[in-house]
Amino acid sequence: MRLKQINIINFGQFSNKSFDLPSKQINVFFGANEAGKSTTVAFIKQIMFGFHLRSNSSPFFEDYTPLAHVSPMGGSLIFEADDSEYELERLYAKGDKTKRGILTVKKDGQVVPENLFFDQIQNIDGSFYADSFIFNQEMLGQVSSLSQEDLLERIYYLGAANSGKLLEMRDGFEKEAGKLFKKTGKKPEVNRLLKQMEDDRDNLAQTQAEFGDYEELDRDLTAKSDELKSKQQALEKLQKRAQELRDLQKELGNYQTLLDLQKQVKDTQFDSENYQKAQDIMAQGRNLQKTIKSLKEQLADLDDNNQADLSASKKLVQQKPQLLQWQAEYKSCLQKADELKQEKEQILALSPDTKQVLDLTPEQIKQLQADYLALPKQENRVEAAPNSNDKLWYVIGAVLAVLGLILLVMMTVGVIALITGLIFLGAGYVKGNNANKQNAAILEKQKLVAQKRQGFGQQYGLNPDNLDINNLVANANQYHLKENAEKVNNEQLSQINQEVAQLAANVQNTLKKPIEDDFSSVLSGIDELEEKIDHSQEIGQRRMTISSALKQDQQDLKELGLQLQTLFAQANVKNMADYDAVYKDSLEQAKIRTQVEALKKSLNDDLTQLTKTNPAELEQQLHELNDQIAAANNEISDLQQQNAQVQVKLNNLADSTAVFEAKQDLANTETNFESSSKEYLANLLAAKWIGRSLDLASNERFPKMLKAAKEYLALLTGGRYVDLDLGKKLTVIRKDGKKRDVRYLSRGTAEQLYFALKLAFVEQIKDEINLPILIDDSFVNFDDNRIKYIEQLLKKISENNQVLIFTAQENLVEKLGIQPLTFTKGNQNA
């Protein structure tokens, strides 16, 4: 299976990046560190096997959320296999709880089920692919820290595809299956649910019997509830009267407060108009002082500020070309928005049913597909015809009966004929009745099929008779992709608007006047700044203007001080603080008068009554009403207790809800039984599947893999190490026949050994799993000679597997003699 194209929409540091892979054997990606080589390796793995937007305990960092915070995340890969082309597109957007992304598989341009692709690679997962087909410095670097036992274990895992873990999984599935069902057991879930179904059926029968007693008690409860309601209404009237008396009692306190406030009222003389004038003069004085200070600072800093303004103006003028570029990009985005809108309308025009599923979640889409596939097919209506044999029974019976009547008076044979005729007539009647029942059953089945298909149409608004479910889902996916593209385009428009708005704000701050944030206004503002630079001589005139204004403001401040002293004399105060105290006193009197008026308004009609009310008599009336309320509460409590007793009896009997619940319990038990049975069968099937997988990856591959590894190690070491000895310890054999433990090898040689073993494993499984080998800067510890040997090995391996090399080593690119695909910093968003 050959990878021919990589299309990155948003992933890590990349946006809208594509690579066409020209070679079927070896493709080289060249770029400096941090240029995106490892990101591309992770992209290939995650598009095939799913995103992992969280920390992952592996030497292969998994979280490549887009740095630019754009959506959707993901892209696509295009493979060639057996004269067909497969496209794998995986996208992730906010709301995807699995965080693995939504995968769409196309074969020759048509959407197909995922398994059509993954069956060809034996349904391996991402971990298997990373362990077997990906080589990077972190993975190879772990070899030097491995113990002898760990290294042997890794070699065996390569040869048998993690057989130890698979055996544990197989035993686990068999154990789980044993927990669910045993032929003679009682505690396993399936056995328990069989017994539970019998108990639920008995409970349903008992519940239906109790429902009759429940209805009689319910009528008694209704009568008592009506009496209780009448008593409660009488109690409400008593409580309302008591509340009226309590309100009057409360108003006695407000009445006394009114009398106290009236004693605090006194006459005050305060000229609010003069006070307001003094306030205004004080405010004008403060403003003038601020203005004078500002004018002085402007005079002091006029030269510096002028130079700063000129410098800022020049910088803004230099941004004019950038503004023109934004203007062109903005028009392009508007055109793209119209195109996307038309494409969406075209999808809906070609497939109107798409509207019905646009608001459905992925889970609801899957449910729609499952419901559609589960619909029963409509069959031709068939009616059971009466059997001709049934009519024969009637004819024979009638003939014998008539013959028996004729011979009855003649001989005993007539009696026998008559009885036989009646028997044939009875048999004909029974046969005809059975035929009628069979005809009714067939009609009922046809009616249920029609109801289910009609229910599907009512639920989803779709006609199942002319529905292409795969085309409908594909159109919905295309529509959502257009919506996502519109979102990206709108974000770009928003970004341009923000940039233009920021530039407009800067121009506005420099010109000190409002500037609209459209292209025309900003261009006009920049042109005005150019004119401002040419007229710097106006600074001198401005200095004269500021000096004149400063003198005038100082004179105005002096005159305001004289006016303020005049107002203080009229109010007989020394300063503004005394004036404020007089003002606060006037406010306090106004507040007291307001409270008096508010209390009078609140008491209103009760004011006259309060002057005549005796607090002791009012307390006595309240006491009598409370006694009546207590008696009424006792009566109501007795009725409530009686109702509660009836309700307890009702609760102990089965009502309609209990009957429904009993039926529901039985249905739930039957559903749980079905689910547990499926789980039991699934565990058995999984255990057998794992056993079969271990057979495929059995030791018959390991001798072949070890032989290939010896050949690759000799090639990688230039013939220095020619053999491997796998006993209790792994040793390598040099050309001179001497053995050497792995722990005494250099780091580079140890990595070469592990490199050879992994490539030998890939070689052995190529007939069943043939995927691109990804090598990400795995030769850092290799010298020039070793790189030369690697070159020879890669060309040998590429005869069976496509090889993608990601490197920053120029000498490796030169030795391979292959035109590389390059990464350049700064063009990740190209």
Image (cartoon, rainbow, N blue to C red):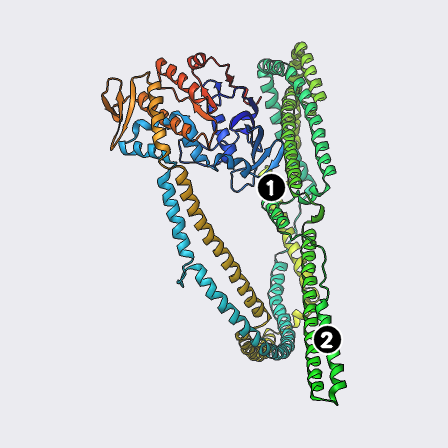
The crowding category of the residue bearing disc 1, from other C-alpha atoms within 10 Å (few below 14, some 14 to 19, many at least 20), is some
Residue type at numbered disc 2: Ile
In the rendered view, tell whether residue 268 sits above or below residue 634. above
- Residue 600 visible (yes or no): no
**Between residues 177 and 393, which one lies in front from this camera angle?**
393
Q: Is residue 479 left or right of residue 698?
A: right
Q: Secondary structure at mark 2?
A: helix
Q: Is residue 122 left or right of residue 783?
A: right
Q: Is residue 223 left or right of residue 680?
A: right
Q: Tell me the quarter of the picture where residue 102 sits.
A: top right
Q: Which mark is residue 580?
A: 1
Q: Is residue 424 left or right of residue 47?
A: right
Q: Quadrant of the C terminus?
A: top right
Mark 1 vs mark 2: give the one in front: 2
Residue tagged 2: 396
Q: Position of residue 315 (x, y in %)?
A: 60, 15
In the rendered view, tell whether residue 797 sits above or below residue 423. above
Q: Position of residue 335 (x, y in %)?
A: 71, 26
Q: Position of residue 250 (x, y in %)?
A: 60, 67
**Between residues 201 and 85, which one lies in front from this camera angle?**
85
- Residue 150 visible (yes or no): yes
- In three-dimensional space, the C-alpha distance between marks 1 and 2, rounded to whole angstroms, equals 129 Å
Residue type at numbered disc 1: Asp
Q: Which mark is residue 336?
A: none
At horizontal 71% and vertical 43% (from top left) the residue drawn is 353
**Between residues 507 and 390, which one lies in front from this camera angle?**
390
Q: Secondary structure at mark 1?
A: helix
